[in-house]
Amino acid sequence: MTHVRIHRFEKLWLGAAFVLIVAFIATIVYGSLGPGVAMVGDDGGTVNPDNPTAADNFRDPGVYQADDDSYDVYVEARQFAFSPGTSEPIRVPADTNVTFHVTSGDVTHGFELVGTNVNTMVIPGQVAQLTVNFDEARTHHIVCHEYCGPAHHAMEGSIEVVPQSEFTPPQQAAADQSEVTDT
Ligand SMILES: [Cu+2]
């Protein structure tokens, strides 16, 4: 039986590489169990990018109440604005389940609420869907983080998370009205 001698420095590098591998795995485990980092799935479905609202899984952009403590927010991204979000802030109540449905009417955009783990690519024809519970009443900045054209750097918006007591439910009437004008 031959005795294999490993040089001290080689042992050191082997050890360092092993520690790094364990550390990388630990960050992934921590990310998914701690801050809840997860991939955005494809459960949002697909739409026709030229007319997203024609599909059953995408409504006119805006905030809709689903039940007592859940809301749906439909956002359409276009060069270079979020609708709603840019010309008027998105308003949602704190401590409720807010499901974002985000799609693009032109090119690939990004949708990120700065300082939170709400972050997704916005692909034309694809509805990105993610549910968030805002535990704090505050304003979050929305940025587009995928280069989408010459004014990409100016593509931003905001979302106002307000205490439930100060929240006025969105006028579901806006949706009903558009149904009336359609006829
Ligand atoms: Cu953009």
Image (spheres, grey):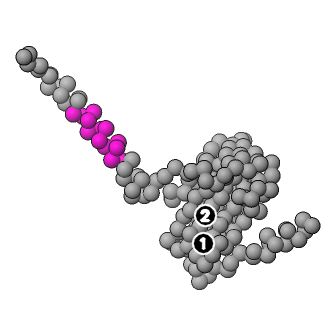
Is 169 placed left or right of 3 in the picture?
right
Q: What amino acid type should be assigned to the residue bearing mark 2?
A: Thr
Residue 93: give x, y in percent of width and height: 59, 74
Instruction: Give the quarter of the figure containing the C terminus.
Output: bottom right
Element on which disc 2 rests: strand
Q: Which residue is mark 1?
A: 70
- Discs 2, 1 touching: Cβ within 8 Å: yes
* Residue nearest the observer in this picture, 3 or 166: 3
Within 10 Å of disc 1 (Cα), the crowding (few <14, some 14-19, many 20+) is some
Q: Residue at x 73, y 50 (%)?
A: 47
Element on which disc 1 rests: strand
Is 55 placed left or right of 102 in the picture?
right
Residue 142: give x, y in percent of width and height: 61, 58
Q: Residue at x 60, y 78 (%)?
A: 68
Q: Residue at x 66, y 64 (%)?
A: 73
Alpha carbons under labels 2 and 1: distance apart: 8 Å
Magenta span of residues: 15-27
* Residue nearest the observer in this picture, 89 or 171: 171
Residue 104 visible in the picture: no
Q: Residue at x 80, y 52 (%)?
A: 51
Which sits earlier in the primary sequence, circle 2 or circle 1?
1
Q: Which residue is mark 2?
A: 99
Residue lying at the far right in this picture: please name it: 183
Is 46 placed left or right of 137 in the picture?
right
Residue lying at the far bottom in this picture: please name it: 165
